[in-house]
Image: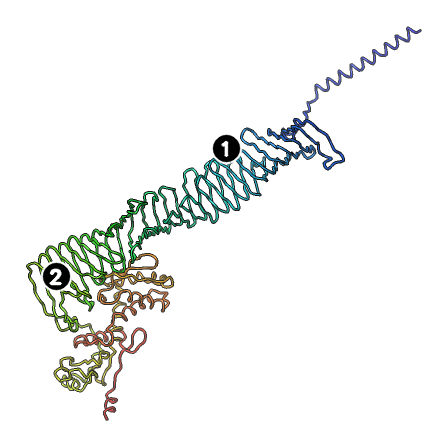
């Protein structure tokens, strides 16, 4: 019985075992046939791993219940970086660490950070280091007390003052961003860069560690020994001591100053300036302005172009030199015997109060104050002009000391009447000056002279003396009065001066209406009868004998007090204002010449400079083409200054500066906006200046020409500005006056 039960029990177990094995085999087959499922992995390095700590415990009832409290050689790992410290709070939930004591953070082989305490956020990948922070990256060192390092952007930032050390370069600032990947840094507030002996101060600075190049933004200064650079936008290479400066920068080196819109500065080398460049040497008292300049402060050599103007104020009077191009060479620089040579070419213009000059090229030597001019040089001194193939001018203090003209020398001196000129020509000429006035002149070789003799009593011209010789010396007294002349064997001829002022004999075509005015006066006897009764002047000293009166009058025209021309017409007596009549004549003449562009120019013997304020410069530039068409030649000297080189023919005796100024003032008053109005304004102004003034005595032929010219005009009654030119005293009025 028992055996039977035992056998049944064993048989049941076998069945169960078989069933289990079958079920296991079925599950195994299902598992093999079903697709495999992979477990989802967390991105590598997301977690901060604790590598080691001598002690670890929790304080559930302390200030940090969520933290693991670690002590003794604490070490963490996160994304390939290591963090070690003396103690720490480890927050696994927030994946962050607070580290204390000898905190050391390492990232790869290039970055290392040490501090007294730090907070590391593994989630944000942010390291916040505090107290005695030192960041080493390659060969750069950053020191501060408060630094945030962002691993995500590879950027270290301090905001409570710090220092970046890059080899010999040390940068200080209140705030800084340093990118470890690009190795570029930005410094803001109280920025200072020390590179060797050079110091850069600014408010904002961008620094490229790889190139050792700093970009300064805002008011900045670079101090290098005695050199000081000021800029608001500049780049400074600390390796080469080169600076690229923009935004109107200045370089000061001892007594020298260089200013320009753009400067490329090289310490102890050649610097370059672009745009409104101004170079000033206070020690040697000279300066240079231009739009392009190369200058080597070590050698003192330079090159300038684009409207350069050299200014030397080492003497009492300032010398101005203008040309297209200039070269400056300095000799014995930084010594007591230093001197400079200035080469100017072409189209040279030089100006001093006592001397003005033009030529193609010029060399000025400050050692002997000699100015040598080449190729068609002309020099003006007072009312004297010198010409030749080459001219040397030596100056002493503020005046000319000696002038030497070589080759085809010509001296022209303007007489006080501004009409006649003393002239001397020779192969060579020397002039000696004293206090700005010529005292002795020497002419050598093929000498020819034209000299006007004057009366000592009234300085009136007596005659013209023409002389030829081989050598001649002239000695001048006060007021340039001739004292004596020495010469070798000579031939000379004296020509007495004429007594009258000649005018062209041709008469302009007159209007038919003018002839009608004389109807009834064809009999010359009637005219002669009127002449005997006219009163011409109230001057009691005048010779009023009949013969003298007749000699001054024409058969038909009479002048009264140098102001009015009177002539008999059929209706009475016509009275003409000679000045206004001439204004009308010249006005229409100039308008016609402007329209036809038939003006002729006459070179001014002594070119003068006219200055315009900004308020008039715009109008002047507008009318300048028309003035050029009239015969004016004005050269732009810069700064609103123009040299008057030529005026319309026939105006040589007038003041060219006043003439130009009056024409511009007239255009300003008119408020010109159209070309016709511009031409009329210019023609009127020019006519006013050139017209016969009141008080000028006219000859018979001059009066006749003036009257005929008036009646050839389109409008004989009024001047262009509306003033009456003439009036007629009727016959009845004359009879009434005489009773």
- Residue 454 lies left or right of residue 324; in this view the side is left
Task: Please say if 197 is above or below 313.
Answer: above
Locate residue 135: give its quadrant: top right
Q: Residues within 10 Å of mark 2 (few under 14, many from 20)?
A: many
How far apart are the two marked residues, 1 and 2, measured between alpha carbons?
A: 84 Å
User: x%, y% of residue 499?
Assistant: 13, 73
Of residues 637 and 136, the one nearer the viewer is 136
Task: Please say if 331 is above or below 558.
Answer: above
Q: Earlier in the sequence, mark 1 or mark 2?
A: 1
Residue 505 visible in rendering: no
User: x%, y% of residue 46?
Assistant: 64, 31
- Residue 139 lies left or right of residue 89; in this view the side is left
Q: Which residue is mark 1?
A: 139
User: x%, y% of residue 698?
Assistant: 19, 76
> Which quadrant holds the C terminus?
bottom left
Q: Residues within 10 Å of mark 1 (few under 14, many from 20)?
A: few
Task: Please say if 11 is above or below 221.
Answer: above
For the point 12% across and 55% down, the residue is: 444
In the rendering, which numbered label is found on residue 34? none
> Which quadrant holds the N terminus?
top right
Task: Give the structural element (helix, strand or loop) at label 2.
Answer: strand
Q: Which residue is mark 2?
A: 449
Locate residue 513: give its quadrant: bottom left
User: x%, y% of residue 538?
Assistant: 21, 84
Of residues 719 and 197, the one nearer the viewer is 197
- Residue 687 lies left or right of residue 279; in this view the side is left
For the point 49% across and 44% down, the residue is: 192
């Amino acid at each position: 019985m028992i055996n039977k039960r035992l056998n049944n029990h064993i048989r049941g177990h076998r069945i169960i075992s078989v069933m289990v094995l079958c079920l296991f085999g079925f599950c195994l087959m299902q598992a093999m046939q079903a697709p495999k499922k992979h477990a989802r992995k967390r991105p590598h390095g997301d977690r901060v791993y604790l590598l080691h700590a001598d002690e670890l415990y929790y304080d559930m009832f302390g200030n940090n219940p969520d933290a693991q409290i670690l002590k003794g050689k604490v070490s963490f790992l996160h994304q390939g970086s290591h963090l070690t410290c003396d103690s720490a709070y480890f927050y696994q939930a927030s994946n962050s660490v607070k580290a204390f004591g000898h905190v050391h953070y390492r990232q790869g082989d290039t970055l290392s950070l040490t501090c007294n305490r730090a907070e590391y956020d593994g989630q944000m990948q942010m390291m916040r280091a505090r107290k005695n922070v030192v960041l080493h990256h390659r060969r750069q060192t950053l020191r501060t007390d408060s630094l945030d390092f962002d691993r995500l952007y590879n950027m270290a930032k301090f905001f409570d003052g710090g220092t970046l050390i890059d080899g010999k370069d040390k940068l200080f600032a209140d705030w800084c961003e340093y990118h470890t990947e690009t190795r570029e840094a930005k410094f803001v507030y109280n920025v200072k860069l020390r590179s060797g002996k050079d110091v850069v101060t600014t408010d904002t600075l961008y620094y490229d560690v790889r190139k050792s190049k700093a970009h300064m933004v805002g008011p900045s200064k670079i101090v290098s020994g005695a050199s000081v650079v000021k800029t608001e936008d500049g780049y400074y290479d600390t390796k080469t001591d080169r600076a690229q400066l923009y935004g109107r920068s200045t370089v000061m080196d001892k007594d020298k100053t260089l200013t320009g819109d753009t400067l490329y500065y090289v310490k102890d080398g050649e610097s370059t300036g672009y745009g409104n460049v101004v170079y000033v040497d206070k020690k040697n008292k000279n300066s240079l302005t231009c739009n392009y300049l190369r200058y080597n402060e070590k050698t003192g050599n330079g090159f300038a172009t684009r409207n350069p103007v050299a200014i030397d104020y080492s003497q009492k009077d300032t010398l101005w030199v203008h040309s297209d191009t200039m070269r400056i060479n300095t000799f014995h620089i930084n010594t007591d015997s230093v001197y400079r040579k200035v080469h100017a070419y072409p189209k040279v213009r030089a100006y001093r109060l006592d001397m003005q000059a033009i030529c193609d090229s010029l060399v000025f030597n400050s050692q002997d104050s000699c100015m040598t001019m080449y190729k068609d040089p002309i020099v003006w001194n007072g009312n004297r002009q010198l010409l030749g193939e080459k001219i040397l001018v030596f100056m002493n203090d503020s005046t000319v000391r000696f002038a030497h003209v070589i080759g085809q020398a010509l001296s022209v001196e303007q007489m006080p009447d501004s009409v006649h000129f003393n002239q001397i020509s020779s192969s060579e000429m020397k002039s000696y000056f004293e206090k700005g006035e010529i005292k002795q002149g020497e002419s050598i070789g093929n000498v020819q002279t034209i000299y006007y003799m004057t009366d000592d009593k009234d300085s009136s011209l007596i005659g013209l003396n023409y002389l030829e010789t081989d050598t001649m010396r002239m000695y001048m007294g006060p007021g340039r009065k001739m004292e004596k002349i020495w010469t070798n064997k000579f031939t000379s001829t004296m020509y007495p001066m004429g007594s009258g002022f000649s005018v062209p004999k041709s008469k302009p075509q007159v209007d038919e209406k003018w002839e009608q005015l004389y109807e009834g006066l064809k009999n010359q006897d009637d005219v002669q009868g009127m002449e005997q009764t006219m009163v011409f002047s109230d001057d009691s000293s005048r010779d009023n004998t009949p013969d003298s009166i007749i000699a001054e009058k024409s058969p038909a025209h009479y002048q009264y007090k140098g102001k009015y021309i009177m002539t008999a017409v059929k209706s009475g007596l016509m009275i003409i204002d000679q000045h206004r009549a001439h204004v009308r004549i010249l006005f229409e003449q100039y308008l016609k010449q402007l329209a036809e562009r038939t003006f002729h120019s006459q070179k001014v013997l002594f070119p003068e400079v006219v200055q315009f304020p900004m308020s008039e410069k715009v109008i002047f530039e507008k009318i300048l083409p028309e003035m050029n068409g009239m015969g004016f030649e004005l050269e732009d000297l810069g700064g609103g200054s123009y040299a008057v080189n030529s005026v319309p023919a026939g105006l040589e005796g007038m003041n060219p500066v006043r003439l130009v100024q009056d024409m511009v003032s007239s255009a300003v008053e008119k408020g010109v906006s159209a070309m016709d109005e511009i031409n009329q304004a210019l023609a009127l102004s020019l006519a006013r200046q050139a017209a016969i003034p009141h008080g000028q005595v006219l000859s018979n032929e001059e009066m006749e020409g003036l009257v005929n010219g008036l009646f050839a005009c389109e409008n004989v009654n009024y001047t262009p500005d509306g003033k009456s030119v003439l009036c007629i005293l009727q016959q009845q009025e004359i009879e009434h006056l005489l009773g």
